[in-house]
Amino acid sequence: MPLPDSNITTDAPPLTVGIVGAGIIGLCTALEAQRKGYRVTLLDRSEPGLGASFGNAGYLATELMDPLSNLKTLRSALPMWLNPHGPLSLPMGHLHKILPWLVRFICAARPANAAKNRDGLEQLNTESIPAWKRCLSDIDARELLVKSGYLLVWETPSKLDDAKQHAIYMAQFGIKTELVQGERLAQLEPEMANNLSHALYFPEAYRVREPYQLCKMLFSAFMARDGSFIRQEVQAVRPQKKRVSVQTPEDMHQFDHAIICTGAWSKQLLKGVGLDVPLEAERGYHLTIDAGNIRLNQPIGSVERRFVMSPLDSGLRVVGMTELGGLDLKPVKRRFASLRHHSRKLMSRLNDSTLPVSEWMGHRPTLPDSLPVIDKHPHHPQLLFAFGNQHLGLTQAAISAELVVGLMIGSDTKINCEPYRVNRF
């Protein structure tokens, strides 16, 4: 049944839309289009949810208002790169390919640019949790969203003032925090307290129970609502008059609209429609530890070590690294060793070689200004885009879906989408 703001009438067949990409953003977008009365086909070369959506920490990081490119990041980049266990890696074999992107990244760090990009992130993050609640309530899966709280931790006592200043900064965005030490810190995280000096507790923070399970639930709901799934690689997308052709190895599929949600793989598809977007594949690594009775009560972010640990149904997820290495290089084994090093420093009981551990590496879609693309093609409005959410793909998936479908049907969107234009570069 079309919603009141849908442009589909009940006496005509439903319009069709092809969603290219079955990650978390593509899945949310497919469901949102179905809510508006469209007949939806989802296309991906892999099973839904097996890309970057599979490997994240499950934490909805709405407090990350600052773009990755800022003066503080630039000042700390060299020490992070030189640190053998540091969070930043620029593989030498890929460095020459990424230099134009790095120049754009440095330009985005100018204070005026960073402030503008921060506003764009704040818009999305502020609406992210309400959008997830709407999405999961619609499919009767609210239990997958957990109000867990979040701890941002420091090991160094001399950094206490940093925590106080960060609490003041968070308050500017209406984000509640509590500075915790000693007994209160031990109460929140008894496994870690001995290694920590202090922390900021975010009591309103949310996580999901398991990212991959969430993707499977979204896909199941999509299919139950007469969705179609084509497991084939999309080779090209071609706007034609008022329709869009989507080319796969076996067929040419025709839709009234198409939305590209292919994350780090979006750049080549956009080149085929005359758009050159400075999208970089930022490689992220994770460990999933079957830690038994070694437990966390909520996600943990380490300021000094720059990584995240999160309790998931599948085990303890350890996530980190920013490796600007493109789509083709193999995983670098020492990145997993660094994650082991950091997790064992914060939770000494993880220093047990008998604990079962799985390793994973995936590709985050990152643009120089840290903002996603949520937009129509400037010359072919029947072709739309939702990709490039960098570290915040899970966080912003539901609101990105609402916005891009709103653009498709021509309704007023909840927030201003101007910062996310595809041709802003």
Image (cartoon, rainbow, N blue to C red):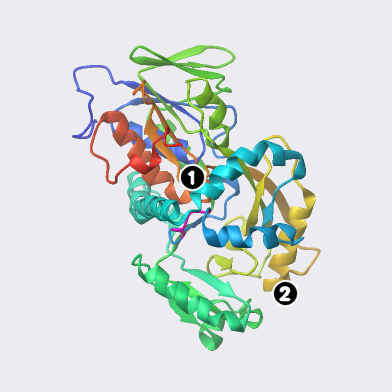
Q: Which residues are magenta?
A: 64-68
* Residue 47 vertical placement versus 298 (above, below): above
Label 1 secondary element: loop
* Residue at x 74%, y 44% (from the top left corner): 331
Of pointers 2 and 1, the one earlier in the residue sequence: 2
Judged from this view, the residue extending furthest toward the right is 353
- Residue 211: x and y in percent read 53, 49
Nearer the observer, 81 or 63: 81
Inspect the image, locate mark 1, and give the three-letter code of the amino acid beneath it: Asn
* Residue 322 vertical placement versus 227 (above, below): below
- Residue 207: x and y in percent read 48, 59
Q: Residues within 10 Å of mark 2 (few under 14, many from 20)?
A: some
* Residue at x 54%, y 88% (from the top left corner): 183
**Residue beneath disc 1:** 389
Q: Tell me, yes or no, whether the highlighted magenta stretch contains residue 175.
A: no
- Residue 322: x and y in percent read 64, 52
- Residue 288: x and y in percent read 67, 56
Q: Is label 2 in contact with label 1 (beta carbons under 8 Å)?
A: no
* Residue at x 27%, y 29% (from the top left corner): 409
**Residue beneath disc 2:** 348
